[in-house]
């Protein structure tokens, strides 16, 4: 009925075959093209069946017709719809489809162009509905625009299905974060756009520490819940600065457009590590995890997505290798260090049997009278080719490769044997890794070590870190009880670095808290709260009748402060480094139980001994020099003769890192340089500049971008050749003169 009306209204005349034909009459006989009546009937049925609808507008694009069954979907009567602007019946939605986003309906209508299968969303109440609509303008014989005629079709079910599949293909169902696929597309799109715009983009890779343990001990639903909470925390920290994705498992990635300041990135990474390390509540259970972060920045560390990802991955690998809860920036050295780590792991397997491991002992001294009360046993590894390798490097490797139990057992026995030879009842403190603590037979190992060496249980102290509380609660409590029953002392190591929950202190029978050196370092500087934190930890320990040891005391001002704050004991280079057993016996054998503190009056900005060839740029000449030491605020270089105090120099620290500084001290071929802008930590014990010279800038100076391997570019390579005459004489410094790190 309805269709007939409009067709007639539009001037369609019933054809000659339009005789009234009674229903059922000749239904199965062919419909002649001129049989308007039967054709209209067909259209009516088509419309009413909702297979598709028809619509038409006037020359103002106001609706003059819409199939009645379609009108119902707007919740309006046909009458109410007629006369409305067609465009007002639909909502403009950005993500409907690309075509609609680029050339939306109102645009097409006002341009009076033909359109086909445009996806639109109905401006109706209730559940959202989507249509595709097509339309064709029509004109009078003189060519004047009369309006549109068109068709429409409901595609809601298809649309929603497609959208869900495309969401599933792009987002992680568990956390709602972008998935690997989407992150990869985003990174490619960004880097391509940024490359021509010469903009930078940072990439962060995160891997959760100890996530597997939570999954194993608390179950997969708890693991899932944990991942969700991690995602929420990340979103809170990152906000609009970047896009976060979960690549799978416990791996996350963050794309941070337009950031190349490593100071800012380091702070962000630090905040992320701190936030992720706060305890989680998972359906009644508490869990604690950590995270490691690796970072790479385009274009410095990679121009193509694959290169940038590889760099960030290497940085992450290095961060994990450096111990837990750390961040790292990519640098060229890392390429070698990944390989080195694998080799170290190989060699560590044989280190014990080859006798390359040793225990050294660092005195723990009573704060009030400098008398030694015991020693901490620290493992030392003298590698036949690599020299000394730090336990901060090899202990985490041992933990990951399941070597820690045998190393730990050996350490316990050796330390007990050595301590049994010390005069008096001095204590020996042995570090016990969380892996050992979680192993059933630790009490047996301890009892055997004591029995075979004759050391009294109360002379043995086990140093445990907060990470042991990660394990199953009941098992942890049982282990504490079993160890206490043996009679050994327990101390909480590195307090303040992890989660520092007071709950732990109440739950576990600790005899001592070791205040981490992070709080001692710089505790006398006015701009930090370390001094107040030390005071708080000490009074807490006093209330719980525990002793305290301040770790890592190096300078006299630090010693004065920890004494003032009433720490019971002090351990640090100010008294002694860890030394071999022979030296301990020598000192104690003379009946000398007192250690005199000796160290710098104040903690200086940490200066590291390095030995590295660098470039020095002055005016437009470039020199080769050797850097002897480096701190955040300055460096000592060697190689240029008689550079006057006050000269401004630029140090090329390689990889695009330029540090501008002024000569403050100068003698012969050695200069002390003060930097204009302090360097920042690279997350490990290294330093780096905040910003780097972009390879784009170098490309602009004539160096083709493609020719620059990622991260490997020395600045103004041959400037000493051209330009003005060098002003300073260059002397050759022998690299071999000192031991390279
Ligand atoms: P830790 O247990 O916190 O040990 C203290 C670390 O601080 C030692 O580093 C020590 O040499 C260093 N230290 C002491 N005084 C100062 C100071 O005044 N200034 C500075 N800068 N450092 C100071 P070390 O020997 O490199 O050991 C690092 C970590 O490796 C230890 O930290 C411990 O967690 C682990 N470790 C060492 N030996 C063993 C072991 O036998 N078993 C286990 N499981 N872990 C061990
Ligand atoms: Mg320790
Ligand atoms: Mg410690």
Image (spheres, rainbow, N blue to C red):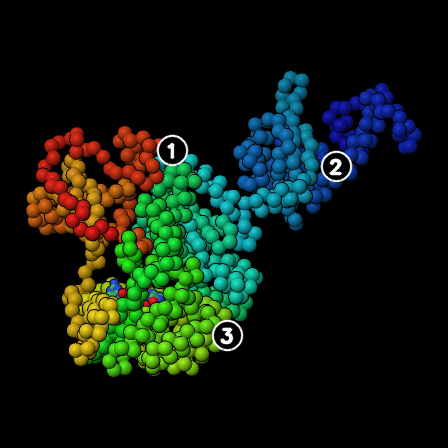
Residue drawn at 16 percent across, 49 percent down: 737
Q: Which residue is mark 1?
A: 196
Image coordinates of residue 699 in percent, x first then y, are 30, 32
Q: Which residue is mark 2?
A: 51
Residue drawn at 58 percent across, 40 percent down: 96
Q: Is label 2's Cβ within 8 Å of ligand 1?
A: no
Q: Which residue is mark 3?
A: 474
Relative to 413, does residue 186 appear above or below in the rendering?
above
Q: Is residue 304 visible?
A: yes
Image coordinates of residue 570 in percent, x first then y, are 24, 73
Going from N to C along the chain, the mark reached first, 2 or 1, is: 2
Q: Is label 1's Cβ within 8 Å of ligand 1?
A: no
* Real-space CA distance between mark 2 and mark 1, rounded to the nearest whole angstrom: 49 Å
Mark 2 or mark 1: which is in front? 1
Bin the neighbour count of mark 1 within 10 Å (Cα to Cα): few under 14, some 14-19, many 20 and up.
few
Q: Is residue 532 visible?
A: no
């Amino acid at each position: 009925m309805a269709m007939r009306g409009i067709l007639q209204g539009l001037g369609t005349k019933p054809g000659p075959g339009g005789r009234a034909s009674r229903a059922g009459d000749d239904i199965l006989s062919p419909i002649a093209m001129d049989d308007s009546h039967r054709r209209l009937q067909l259209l009516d049925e088509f419309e009413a069946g909702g297979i598709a609808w028809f619509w038409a507008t006037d020359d103002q694009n106001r609706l003059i017709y819409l199939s009645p069954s379609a009108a119902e979907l707007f919740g309006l009567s046909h009458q109410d719809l007629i006369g409305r602007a067609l465009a007002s019946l639909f909502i403009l939605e950005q993500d409907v489809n690309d075509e609609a986003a680029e050339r939306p309906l109102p645009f097409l209508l006002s341009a009076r162009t033909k359109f086909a299968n445009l996806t639109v969303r109905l401006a109706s109440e209730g559940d959202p509905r989507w249509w595709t609509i097509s339309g064709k303008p029509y004109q009078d014989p003189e060519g004047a625009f009369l309006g549109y005629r068109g068709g429409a079709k409901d595609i809601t079910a298809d649309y929603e299905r497609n959208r869900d599949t495309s969401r599933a293909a792009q987002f992680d169902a568990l956390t709602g974060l972008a998935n690997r696929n989407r992150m990869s597309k985003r990174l490619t799109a960004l880097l391509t756009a940024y490359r021509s715009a010469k903009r930078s983009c940072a990439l962060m890779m995160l891997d959760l520490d100890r996530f597997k343990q939570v999954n194993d001990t608390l179950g997969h639903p708890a693991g899932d819940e944990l991942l969700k909470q991690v995602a929420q925390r990340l979103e809170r920290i990152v906000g609009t600065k970047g896009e976060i994705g979960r690549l799978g498992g416990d791996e996350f990635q963050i794309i941070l457009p337009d950031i190349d300041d490593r100071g800012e990135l380091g702070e962000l990474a630090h905040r992320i590590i701190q936030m992720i390390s706060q305890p989680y509540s998972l359906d009644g259970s508490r869990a604690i995890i950590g995270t490691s972060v690796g970072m790479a920045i385009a274009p410095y560390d990679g121009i193509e997505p694959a290169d940038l990802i590889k760099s960030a991955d290497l940085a992450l690998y290095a961060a994990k290798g450096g111990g837990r809860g750390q961040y790292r920036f990519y640098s060229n050295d890392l390429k070698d260090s990944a390989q080195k780590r694998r080799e170290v792991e190989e060699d560590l397997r044989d280190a014990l049997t080859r006798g390359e491991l040793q225990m050294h002992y660092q005195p723990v001294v009573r704060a009030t009278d400098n008398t030694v009360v015991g020693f901490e046993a620290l493992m030392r590894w003298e590698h036949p080719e690599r020299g000394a390798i730090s336990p901060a490097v090899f202990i985490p490797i041992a933990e990951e490769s399941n070597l820690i139990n045998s190393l730990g057992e050996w350490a316990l026995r050796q330390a007990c044997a050595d301590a049994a030879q010390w005069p008096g009842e001095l204590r020996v403190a042995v570090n016990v890794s969380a892996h050992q603590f979680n192993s059933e037979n630790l009490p047996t190992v301890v009892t055997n070590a004591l029995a075979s060496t004759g050391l009294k249980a109360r002379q043995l102290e086990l140093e445990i870190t907060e990470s042991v509380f990660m394990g199953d609660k009941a098992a942890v409590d049982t282990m504490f009880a079993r160890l206490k029953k043996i009679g050994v002392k327990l101390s909480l190591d590195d307090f303040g670095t992890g989660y520092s929950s007071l709950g732990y202190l109440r739950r576990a029978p600790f005899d001592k808290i070791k205040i981490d050196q992070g709080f001692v370092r710089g505790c006398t500087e006015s701009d930090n709260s370390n001094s107040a934190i030390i005071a708080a930890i000490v009074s807490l320990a006093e209330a719980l009748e525990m002793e305290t040891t301040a770790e890592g005391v190096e300078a006299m001002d630090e010693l004065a402060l920890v004494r003032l704050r009433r720490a019971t004991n002090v351990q640090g280079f100010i008294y002694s480094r860890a030394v071999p057993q022979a030296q301990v016996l020598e000192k104690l054998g003379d009946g000398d139980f007192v250690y005199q503190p000796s160290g710098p009056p104040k903690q200086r900005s940490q200066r590291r001994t390095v030995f590295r060839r660098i470039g020095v740029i002055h005016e437009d000449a470039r020199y080769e020099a050797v850097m002897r030491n480096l701190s955040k605020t300055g460096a000592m270089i060697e190689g240029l003769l008689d550079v006057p105090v006050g000269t401004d120099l630029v140090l090329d620290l390689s990889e695009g890192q330029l540090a501008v500084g002024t000569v403050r001290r100068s003698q012969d071929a050695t200069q002390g340089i003060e930097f204009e802008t302090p360097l920042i930590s690279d997350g490990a014990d290294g330093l780096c500049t905040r910003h780097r010279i972009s390879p784009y800038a170098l490309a602009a100076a004539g160096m083709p971008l493609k020719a620059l391997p990622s991260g490997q570019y020395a600045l103004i390579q041959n400037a000493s050749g051209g330009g003005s005459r060098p002003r300073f004489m260059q002397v050759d410094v022998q690299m071999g003169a000192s031991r390279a790190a």
